[in-house]
Image: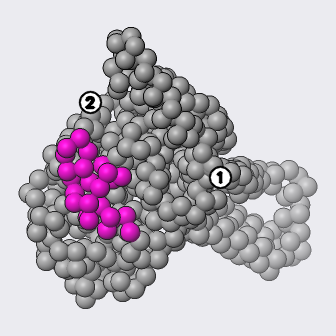
Amino acid sequence: MAGEVRGRRHHWPTFLRQLILVVLLAGVVATGPTPPVAAAEAAVEAADWSEVDAFVRGRLDATDTPGAALAVIEDGRVVHQRGFGEDGRGRPVTPDTPFLWGSLSKPVTGLAVLQQVEAGRVKLDAPVRAYLPWFRLSDREASDRITVRHLLTHTSGIPTSASGEIGDRYDNAPGALADAARDLARVEPADRPGGSYEYSSAGYAVLGALVEEVTGRPFGTYLHQKILDPLGMRHAVATEGDFTRERVAPGHRSVFGTAVPFDAPYDTSGVPYGHVGGSAEDLTRFALAELGGGVLDGHRVLSAKGIADSQRGHVESSAGRYGLGWSVGTLKGTGERMVWHDGALPGHHAMLVMLPDSDRAVIVLQNAYHQLRAKEFADAAIGAAQLLSGAAPRTTPADGFAVALPWATAALVAVLLLSAVAPALRQLPGRRAAVRARSRRRIALTTVASAAAALATAALLWQLPAFLGGTLPMALLWLPDVGWGLVAAIALALLLALERTALGVLDLRRDSGSRRERRMAGAA
């Protein structure tokens, strides 16, 4: 998703709202009972958000998302919140419904690291091994040169694919995060440190382990003590205990176009890059602190300079530029600077779009996700931000490949299954005669060709997830219909190769027997 941004405002202009407030406050003077703060809140509630709500609702329908929460921030206040649909347990979604945030956890981790920088415990340009002596990739020399800044900006050389090596473990044992980071020792770097941008959740796992090391606290505990609790994020999730307490409902994965609940456990080993969570209300608190220069309700979590540095694009990325935990770009249609991050887990999608120059932000949390339709899920937040800024909202058409792939995989399974049961036709008299009529050479060539074709099919199917940027286990987790279709197709292709080989050997033996019988009959 490119950094995009800006548009038309579909709420009342500031001067009009100020006029309304004056009238309301005049009523307060005349009647006395309504406090000024209540009058201001009443004015916000009177604003017409129907167009924004309708747009978000339309995007949820387009992606078959059962439930979502929306929040809008303007001028240092939450001016609109609402829930759509139901959670994975059939309860209505509200602004207090907890979701998991996926990679939107990364800005939270970035903030935690920068707190250590400002406390003097960590230096951005120091080698990671200065704090984690055990940290290494398969290339020890490269490992020695990876800095904290490299990890924050995804320029460490740790490949995107490393997430498949250490991610989605659902490991909640003590030390799970450090154990995951240690397993990077078998990963080959994709580039030299600082050489190029390559998005890496694995790098943020290392950052979480670093925070644990320098603070002496579990990462989730640290987040609560230094970020989540001070900002009043009451339903925030950063530990397995939080996940249980908040009763985070199952998300939804797409199975042949239908949203199916997926009740995954929590993953303590993945908190720094994907398993922070909370409600839309919680995320508004985090956004308000980011827009407010690191302070909210008198609680400062980072200096204004630190916040500004984190929101500044440090390196060119695949989506504009990347800062110290944030993507940075411009809103398509307006050119306004946009600081944003989205995130996904199997069954959840979250996005926060901040427009710092106009002091606005949009949050959309969704309880469904499809890995091959990521832009469609991001449209809800991006498009809402564009509406608020006066631009036409982005609506990505459904990806025909993503829609067709599960059905194509199922069709392939059906073809392979029919091919595997086809040898039953050999029991027909005509088929047996045709087999007897074949030469030994033809039998051998047919056997080798059919077995080779089946093996090649299995190999190609095994490589398909890599072509899509993942692995077969990742496909099973993120795209279950495709993943299980591939498993079935690979198994059937291997079975078919074995079957064709066995039948070929049997046909050759039968042919040899038939030849002996004919020779004996001729001799008689």
Q: Provide the secondary structure element on which disc 1 rests.
A: loop
- Residue 341: image quadrant is bottom left
Task: Say left or right for 331 vs 444.
Answer: left
Residue position marked by numbered label 1 in the rendering: 391
Residue found at x 31% / y 68%: 309
Q: Provide the secondary structure element on which disc 2 rests.
A: helix
Residue found at x 43% / y 51%: 359
Q: CA distance from mark 1 to mark 2?
A: 41 Å
Residue 268 in picture, x, y percent from top left = 26, 49
Q: Which mark is residue 465?
A: none
Between marks 1 and 2 in the image, the one whose residue lies nearer the viewer = 1
Residue position marked by numbered label 2 in the rendering: 245
The stretch drawn in magenta includes residue 301: yes
Whether 20 is drawn above or below 125: the answer is above
Is residue 354 visible to the viewer in this orientation of the structure?
A: no
Tell me the amino acid under the disc marked 1.
Ala
Is residue 150 visible to the viewer in this orientation of the structure?
A: yes
Residue 448 in picture, x, y percent from top left = 71, 75
Is tag 1's residue or tag 2's residue first in the polypeptide sequence?
2
Residue found at x 20% / y 50%: 300
Give the camera-side residue of 19 and 83.
19
Give the camera-side residue of 398 and 54.
54
Residue found at x 38% / y 30%: 96
Residue 417 in picture, x, y percent from top left = 70, 51
Tell me the amino acid under the disc marked 2.
Arg
Which span is picked out in magenta? Answer: 289-312
Residue 458 in picture, x, y percent from top left = 62, 66
The stretch drawn in magenta includes residue 195: no
